[in-house]
Amino acid sequence: MSNIKKEINEDTYPCPVEVTVDIIGGKWKGLILYHLISGTKRFKELRRMLPKTTQRMLTLQLRELEKDGIIHREVYPEIPPKVEYSLTNFGETLKPIIFLMRDWGETYENEVLLKRQSIENE
């Protein structure tokens, strides 16, 4: 493993968690991945599923995930252009992490909201 890091000639990550956070961190990447787990989505579908994001931000996040090999972008030569996104085999390896995040959110959503509300009321 260390030989690979030396060959890449880039800064290495000081902590393995940082690698994961770098790939799926940010407000929208985890949500994009969660929605792609159920199958291929067109850009407009993702846009509807993530109404609080801007078109520009969604595009940036999708490009980063594509650059990292997590998602595949398929452009069909049609007018208007049709673009679809799907998980790559490498992206599929993130499913357990995304499912654990979902499960944790379902379990602790109320507790988080109550804690935030109690702090706001102080």
Image (tube, helix red, strand yellow):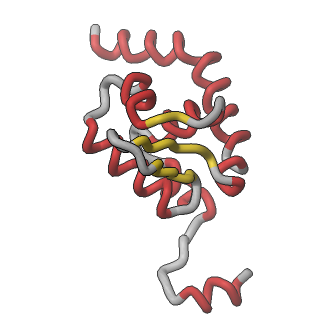
Query: Residue 23, image x and y in percent?
Result: 52, 55
Q: Residue at x 37, y 10 (%)?
A: 118
7, above or below 71, in the image: below
Within the image, what quadrant is residue 51 found in? top left
Left or right: 21, with 48 as reference point: right
Q: How many marks?
A: 0
Q: Which residue is at the front of the view, 98 or 73?
A: 73
Query: Residue 109, image x and y in percent?
Result: 53, 16
Q: Residue at x 68, y 32 (%)?
A: 99
Query: Residue 58, image x and y in percent?
Result: 35, 41
Q: Residue at x 62, y 46 (%)?
A: 87
Query: Residue 39, image x and y in percent?
Result: 64, 33
Q: Which residue is at the front of the view, 100 or 42?
A: 42
113, above or below 41, in the image: above
Within the image, what quadrant is residue 103 found in? top right
Q: Quadrant of the N terminus?
A: bottom right
Q: Which residue is at the front of the view, 67 or 75?
A: 75
Left or right: 6, with 75 as reference point: right
Q: Residue at x 38, y 23 (%)?
A: 48
Left or right: 29, with 105 as reference point: left
30, above or below 35, in the image: below
Q: Quadrant of the C terminus?
A: top left
Left or right: 96, with 108 as reference point: right
